[in-house]
Amino acid sequence: MSDAGSIKVWVLVFVALFGVGTVALVGIGCAVGANQCPFVKNKALTTTDGMTLYQSTCIGCHGARGEGGTADAPPLRSGEAATLTLAQIEAKIANGKPFFMPAYSKKKKHGTFSDAQIQAVAEYVISLRTKS
Ligand code: HEC
């Protein structure tokens, strides 16, 4: 095969593998219900009950009682998080942290939470500090 021919083959192989890799990543992302799935807009919850919002959204990473521990998520009932003000917690929920925590504000690309929902769940997070 000529040099030009083998370069073309490698370009095709590269393009094919890149395509397969991308499809696989997106597929896995969507299968596990990741925030980043490009096809599905996260289902919007309509409740403004902080506990319901927390239990349906945050529990997987931060634990049922905010004890933390999953996916590198810190505890919310103790440590640094227990020193945050309501406004700081609201900002964290609204904006998240790229690659670590989703941004929940409706104003963000995949977010679905209204300001009232963000406030409600932030108040619930604070209440975890004193729950046994
Ligand atoms: C995918 C896992 C994940 C989910 C889901 C998640 N978080 Fe987080 N959260 C993290 C990680 C990781 C951090 C630490 C990020 C950082 O360093 O700022 C964090 C940080 C925080 C902090 C700041 C804690 C501190 O010590 O500064 C608060 C408050 C918080 N999350 C609240 C929430 C609430 C409320 C929800 C649900 C609406 C939620 N998180 C959903 C992973 C998650």
Image (cartoon, grey):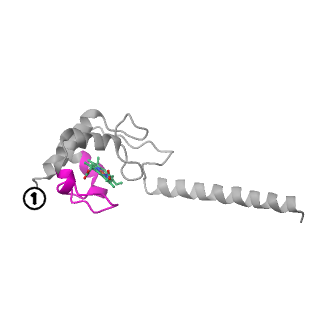
Q: Position of residue 68 (x, y in %)?
A: 25, 59
Question: Quarter holding the C terminus?
Answer: bottom left
* Tally of numbered tags: 1
Q: Is residue 18 left or right of residue 79?
A: right
Give the residue at x 16% y 47%: 126
Ligand 1 has an atom within 8 Å of the beta carbon of the residue at disc 1 = no
Residue 64 visible in the picture: yes
Q: In this view, does 51 lie to the left or right of 25?
A: left
Q: Name the residue under label 1.
A: 132
Amino acid type shown at disc 1 = Ser
Task: Give the camera-side residue of 43 and 112.
Answer: 112
Q: Is residue 63 left or right of residue 101?
A: left
Determine crowd level at label 1: few under 14, some 14-19, many 20+ residues with C-alpha closer than 10 A: few
Query: Is 62 inside the magenta-drawn segment?
Result: yes
Q: Does 25 appear above or below 113?
A: below
Q: Which residue lies furthest to the right in this view?
A: 2
Element under disc 1: loop
Residue 49 visible in the picture: no
Query: Is 71 inside the magenta-drawn segment?
Result: yes
Q: Position of residue 117 (x, y in %)?
A: 26, 38
Question: Quarter holding the N terminus?
Answer: bottom right
Task: Give the camera-side residue of 57 and 43.
Answer: 57
Task: Give the camera-side residue of 83 and 124.
Answer: 83
Q: Is residue 85 left or right of residue 20?
A: left
Q: Which residue lies furthest to the bottom in this view?
A: 1
Give the quarter of the image for residue 46. Answer: top left
Give the residue at x 66% y 60%: 17
Give the residue at x 15% y 52%: 128
Q: Which segment did they paint magenta? A: 53-82
Q: Position of residue 60 (x, y in %)?
A: 31, 57
